[in-house]
Image (cartoon, helix red, strand yellow):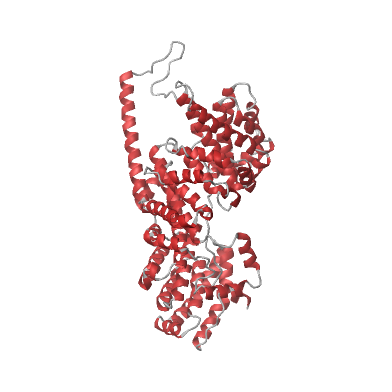
């Protein structure tokens, strides 16, 4: 069978205002060379008026979302111009400057973030975080008048700055090194400790902590008992709102990253606490919550509109005006001047709660996958293995030693295995592999502001399928419910595959369900459940519209029925030989059509057709005389 590895997840790049490329298409033309807006805004950053500087930062925050504008901003050294404004005398300017850098780091990607580190953005950013921390401490002692206003401003600035730090550390190892060196851990933990009064700031910190604690032994040594207590307090918070669900999930991920420094006597307790949180997150029916939140938003907006109309009717046709102001036409709204709201994600309460839940569920599934493959080879090791002349022999030995589980590093500790079972993690993951609630999808699709949630719901399904792949690979058949449960699972995955007519357009779904199927077939093959596998694979190979999936099914068939008396009996019972002879010309025609039309994925289609075209006839000949070749589909392309 082909090489495979269990996927580990890292956080995808966060865009604070949505899909940057989509906004670029809507707001600017590709390849546009006009730098005038950027030049004008950057020039205003030096204006003596704080209000002008604030306005310029807000304009840049919108401009950086247009990808064609990024090269011009880089040429004009936007980062070096914005950086000093993080320490501007005006709190409003600090906040908008941090917001602009947040958008730049989110929309610019890895290269832009690395360039920001090169241009020393970390120096003013760390200084700002330290000042905000000191400001929050001193603000507790300040006079009551202005106390609340100052605290809110400082916390808002800290939240923006934390998001900049999070994005940059996600993309740059140099930024993580600076985080370690400058003692940022103590600062961000102080912010996290305020989770009961500012959950938004705490969530930003939790995102950042989950990033910087991954594969960072230097930082792990900095975690003291009080630091661990802060994490414990946040993780065990009794509040059950969607924001707190997300916070607790992120902190649980951070604590898992710290497992190497947790005393062995506390390991079982901590692992139970982590998986209890993940179990509770996954138990929530996200589709129903989305429907409820959308209905609540509709009712709230309807009530607000009715109230507004009543007030307007009571006030007459014109709004009250000052003597020095011109008349304002009927129904024209006077909007409070603000810029920060333009930089942040949607602030509608219901939408925020729905997004928080979906993000928490996706994060929970990613943590579970990472728990299953915590000993996985590094990317460099995998590349070295894949290119090695000895890789085929290594793969064959690994398959034998792992009882049919291909290159499986998935050896859970007793504590994790027990917690998985106690909290019904396999069952809850299985439930998440179903397609998203069709009513929720329909409601979100018809609302521009909710439309992005459809992608989030689909992503959760794909993550659940990858989770399923890991669990099927590492758990005993008995813990999965026995042979009958495996057959039910095969039917479930088959229904998913065939009930999605345009699934081939969804790359993530195809990859996830293919991985889950491969893991299931490996497990079933190792338990000699040949007849069930054969029927399932034949159905996939002969009915699936995707050449790649059909090729994978054929590849698996060749392996499952390669040798053994039980395999031979099963092949006769399901009439494998006659079915494949009948399918051979159909497969060849499908492959040639795919190549002529250059259908996605064209390169994979070429490999499948080349391998199957040579090996399938040979395999059928060997079957007819009772001898089966031991090569795999793709290996045969070289014969």
Whether residue 569 is visible here, answered yes or no, is yes
Whether residue 95 is visible here, answered yes or no, is no
Residue 597 lies, in percent from the top left, at: 55, 63
Classify 256 as above or below 230. below
Residue shown at 58%/53% (left/top)? 215
Instruction: Please tell me which residue lies in front, 232 or 594.
Output: 232
Residue 634 lies, in percent from the top left, at: 58, 73
Classify 232 as above or below 560. above
* Picture quarter with the C terminus: bottom right
Instruction: Please tell me which residue lies in front, 475 or 359.
Output: 475
Q: Quick one: which residue is furthest to the bottom in this view?
A: 625
Residue 78 lies, in percent from the top left, at: 65, 35
Instruction: State left or right for residue 543 relative to residue 8.
Output: left
* Residue 65 occupies quadrant: top right
* Picture quarter with the N terminus: bottom right
Q: Quick one: which residue is furthest to the top in this view?
A: 323
The total of numbered circles placed on residues is: 0
Instruction: Please tell me which residue lies in front, 511 or 189.
Output: 189
Residue shown at 38%/18% (left/top)? 319
Classify 231 as above or below 403. above
Instruction: State left or right for residue 429 relative to residue 384.
Output: left
Residue 590 lies, in percent from the top left, at: 51, 70
Classify 497 as above or below 148. below
């Amino acid at each position: 069978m082909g090489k495979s590895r269990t996927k580990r997840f890292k956080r995808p790049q966060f865009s604070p205002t949505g899909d940057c490329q989509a906004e670029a298409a809507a707001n600017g033309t590709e390849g546009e060379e006009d730098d005038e807006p950027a030049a004008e805004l950057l020039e205003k950053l030096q204006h003596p008026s704080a209000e002008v500087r604030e306005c310029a930062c807000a304009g840049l925050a919108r401009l950086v979302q247009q990808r064609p504008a990024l090269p011009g901003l880089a040429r004009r050294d936007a980062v070096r111009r914005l950086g000093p404004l993080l320490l501007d005398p005006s709190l409003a300017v600090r906040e908008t400057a941090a917001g602009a850098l947040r958008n730049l780091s989110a929309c610019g990607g890895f290269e832009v973030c690395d360039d920001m580190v090169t241009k020393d953005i970390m120096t003013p950013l760390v200084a700002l975080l330290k000042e905000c921390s000191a400001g929050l401490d001193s603000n507790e002692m300040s006079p009551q008048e202005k106390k609340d206003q100052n605290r809110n401003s400082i916390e808002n600035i800290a939240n923006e700055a934390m998001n900049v730090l999070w994005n940059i550390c996600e993309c740059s190892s140099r930024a993580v090194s600076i985080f370690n060196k400058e003692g940022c851990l103590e600062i961000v933990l102080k912010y996290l400790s305020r989770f009961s009064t500012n959950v938004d700031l705490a969530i930003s910190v939790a995102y950042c902590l989950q990033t910087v604690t991954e594969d960072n032994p230097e930082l792990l040594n900095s975690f003291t008992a009080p630091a661990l207590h802060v994490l414990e307090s946040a993780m065990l918070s009794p509040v059950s709102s969607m924001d707190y669900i997300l916070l607790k999930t992120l902190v649980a991920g951070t604590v898992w990253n710290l497992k190497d420094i947790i005393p062995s006597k506390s390991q079982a307790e901590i692992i139970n606490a982590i998986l209890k949180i993940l179990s509770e997150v996954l138990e929530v029916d996200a589709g129903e919550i989305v429907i409820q939140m959308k209905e609540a938003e509709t009712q709230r907006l309807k009530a607000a509109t009715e109230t507004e109309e009543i007030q307007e009717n009571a006030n007459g046709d014109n709004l009250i005006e000052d003597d020095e102001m011109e008349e304002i036409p009927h129904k024209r709204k006077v909007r409070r001047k603000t810029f920060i709201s333009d930089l942040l994600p949607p602030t509608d309460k219901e939408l925020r709660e729905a997004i928080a839940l979906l993000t928490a569920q996706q994060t929970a599934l990613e943590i579970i996958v990472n728990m299953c493959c915590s000993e996985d080879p590094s990317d460099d090791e995998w590349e070295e293995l894949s290119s090695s002349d000895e890789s085929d022999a290594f793969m064959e030995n690994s398959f034998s030693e792992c009882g049919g589980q291909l290159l499986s590093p998935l050896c859970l500790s007793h504590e994790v295995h027990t917690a998985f079972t106690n909290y019904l993690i396999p069952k809850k993951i299985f439930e998440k592999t179903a397609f998203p609630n069709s009513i929720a999808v329909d409601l979100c699709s018809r609302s521009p502001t909710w439309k992005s949630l459809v992608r989030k719901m689909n992503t959760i399904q794909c993550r659940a399928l990858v989770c399923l792949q890991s669990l099927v690979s590492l758990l005993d058949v008995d813990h999965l419910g026995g042979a009958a449960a495996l057959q039910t699972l095969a039917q479930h995955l088959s229904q998913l595959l065939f009930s999605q007519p345009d699934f081939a357009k969804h790359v993530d779904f195809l990859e996830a369900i293919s991985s889950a199927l491969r893991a299931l077939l490996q497990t079933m093959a190792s338990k000699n459940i040949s007849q069930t596998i054969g029927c399932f694979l034949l159905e996939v190979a002969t009915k699936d519209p995707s050449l790649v999936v059909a090729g994978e099914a054929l590849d698996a068939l060749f392996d499952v029925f390669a040798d053994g008396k039980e395999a031979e009996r099963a092949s006769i019972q399901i009439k494998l030989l006659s079915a494949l002879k009948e399918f051979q010309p159909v497969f060849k025609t499908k492959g040639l059509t795919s190549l002529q039309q250059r259908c996605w994925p064209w390169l994979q289609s070429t490999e499948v057709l080349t391998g199957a075209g040579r090996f399938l006839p040979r395999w059928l000949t060997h079957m007819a005389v009772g001898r089966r070749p031991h090569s795999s589909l793709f290996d045969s392309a070289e014969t």
